[in-house]
Amino acid sequence: MRCHRLAERDDADWTRLDAAVGQLEESWRTASDATLGQLVPPCGDPLRGPVLIQLIKIDQEYRWRAGRRKLLEAYLADWPELSNRSQAVVELLEAECRTRAIFESMPALEELQSRFPEVAGQVDLVSIAKNAEREGGQSSPDPNWDAPATPEGSMGSTPSQRGGTLPPSASPLGSRYEICAILGQGGMGTVYRAYDTRLEREVALKTPCIDPNDEPAVLGRFLREAKTMAGIRHPNICQVFDAGQSGGTYYIAMALIEGQSLAAWMKDRVVDPRDAAVLLYKLARALAVVHAAGVVHRDLKPQNVMIDQRREPLLMDFGLARPMQADNPFTGTHSVLGTPAYMSPEQVNGEPASVQSDI
């Protein structure tokens, strides 16, 4: 997505755009079959074009993933108002190439020239191929591409493209979740790729590596993460579906994100300043929702932000979050929690974290 074209939108515009995107994604998740026409603003609305372009990108990606391929020509036939907008056509053609590179194979330049001879030369297939490879493309996958384990013990990443081999001792959590593979391990536990047999969907399943009888404070922090995330809905916050206990194992079931951590995404990449500003703006708006709910994250870092296949950032891993009320701390007085390299001075000194600490 050419993010700088949206950078000058105000909060009200972003809210409307996020709402339309959220409704379309929810319709795909629930098979409610919402149409783009139900979500696009009416003619004359200044947001009609930007919303329509973004919805087409998302709809095409979901269709390609589901094996219901729909080429750009079909969308332009549905929405002829875009056909004479060369910049919009280029943007959508680039998005199609990226989607195909990730889920199938990159189209050849000759194909693009035969389909869109007037704008095909403006599509940078080399850059698209490189980005698709970094974001989970099949052309030349990096085996370490989605490794989330870090020295800080982060469990924030829930990438879904590849997972480690499941150990022989692992078993499904009860009858609902079937564990398929290990996605990553950190200081607080393990993230699995799992299948929800009840709702028939893949999820990321987070389990803490603690003994509930020996470490109640850590377990309490883990369960609070589930309650915090389950109560917050925002396009740039990883969604939690379920949390509970099966036998002696506690777990959180969350959205399985197609992507990689911001830390991995930034590696060996030069990020355009405008794109970086838009990315941080989205994270700031997501963080504002968290703060409005009365919660301080306390451990914001690149490993706790995911970049999905649409290059959208998602804030996650509230394992160190705590309510802002002073009478309900997660840990004892002057305890230090977080990642040292990213801590605010007050956290390093063992003082209470605040909204300002996150910022």
Image (cartoon, rainbow, N blue to C red):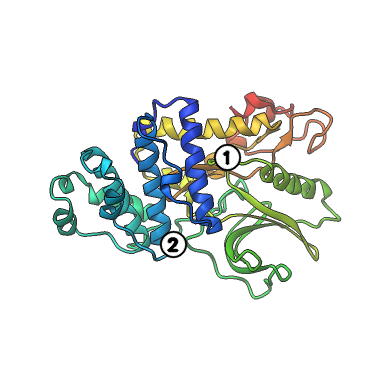
The residue carrying mark 1 is 234
Quadrant of the rendering where the N terminus is positioned: top left
The residue carrying mark 2 is 143
Labels 1 and 2 touching (C-beta < 8 A) = no
Looking at the image, the residue that sits furthest to the bottom is 168
Q: Is residue 284 above or below residue 163?
A: above
Name the amino acid type tagged 2.
Pro
Residue 267's quadrant in the figure? top left
Which SS class for mark 2? loop
| Image coordinates for residue 164, horizontal then vertical, percent | 54, 66
| Residue at 49% across, 34% down | 16
Residue 130 shown left or right of residue 204 in the figure: left
Quadrant of the rendering where the C terminus is positioned: top right
| Residue at 65% across, 40% down | 232
Q: Nearer the viewer, residue 100 or 166?
A: 100
Which of the numbered marks, if any, corresponds to residue 35? none
Q: Nearer the viewer, residue 1 or 13?
A: 13
Can you see residue 336? Answer: no
Residue 75 shown left or right of residue 176 in the figure: left
